[in-house]
Image: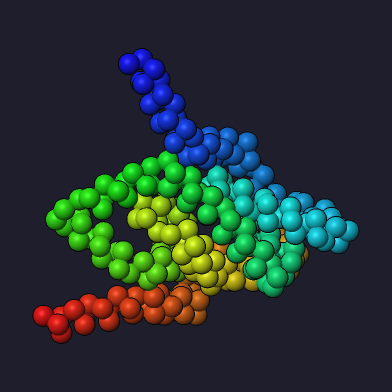
Amino acid sequence: MTDIVTETRKSAFGRYLPILIVAAGAALGWWLLRDYLSFQALAQNREALIAFRDANYLATVLVFILAYTVVVAFSLPGATIATLTGGFLFATFPGALFNIIGATIGATLIFLAARTSFGERLGARLEGSEGLVKKIKDGIDDNQWSMLFLIRLVPVVPFFMANLIPSILEVPLKRFVISTFFGIMPGAIVYTSVGAGLGEVFARGETPNLGIIFEPQILLPILGLSALALMPVVLKALRGRKGL
């Protein structure tokens, strides 16, 4: 009996180990790195970063993508600063591509950690539930692509939550990766373009406008894409009503 209990505890610990690593890394990162992942730190080290990039371009690209992955995977402060840095070092393109790759890899790591730790179990419980909860779960399952793109496109959905929710809803890994890569693209391009203009901002001693994504000329096209993502859901609902 004691052996069974011990094995059960080991199994539970192994299952939760990935998310525990993420949580520990996040706590450690917030404590140690919060002063380094800031706009001020970027401004102070901009010349050294440019010099290193010019002397070691490929190495800079690889280190940058790795650093961005770590920032996202452990939900460290400074994801926006990392995006700006991508634009500052590599211009809007290929900087946006490097940002998207790093963010997608980091998001996928969180997704896998959450799914391994608790996502599969919660997903199974939802699937086996009844009543309203089951109807909501089935509705989401029928419109996974729309839901995935929507939570990426709408600026008010926290990036961390957009990685956790799919892990509970039994979203296939391939679908998660594709929707993340393309869903974060509009926002990534906007902030990368802001980063590409940081040289002039530094020269004026100013700070970048990080609220630019909420300005009408930026927000309205993103909301338009969100509406397109919802279109299949609306069409299915209308067809369902006509069939009644």
In the image, residue 223 above or below residue 102: below
Q: Position of residue 16 (x, y in %)?
A: 44, 35
In the image, residue 179 above or below residue 18: below
Residue positioned 40% across, 31% down in the render: 12
Residue positioned 46% across, 80% down in the render: 221
Residue positioned 64% across, 68% down in the render: 96
| Quarter placement of the C terminus | bottom left
In the image, residue 14 above or below residue 78: above
Residue lying farthest to the right in this orientation:
55
Closer-to-camera residue (28/113): 113
Q: Position of residue 63 (x, y in %)?
A: 74, 52
Closer-to-camera residue (202/98): 98
Q: Is residue 148 visible?
A: yes
Residue lying farthest to the top in this orientation:
2
Closer-to-camera residue (180/158): 180
Describe residue 111's horizontal placement relative to residue 196 as left or right: left
| Quarter placement of the N terminus | top left
Q: Quadrant of residue 91?
A: bottom right
Residue lying farthest to the left in this orientation:
244
Q: Position of residue 213 (x, y in %)?
A: 51, 70
Residue positioned 78% across, 56% down in the render: 60
Q: Position of residue 42 (x, y in %)?
A: 71, 53
Closer-to-camera residue (102/40): 102
Q: Is residue 208 visible?
A: no
Q: Quadrant of residue 230?
A: bottom left
Rendering colour mode: rainbow
- What is the tally of numbered marks visible in this picture? 0
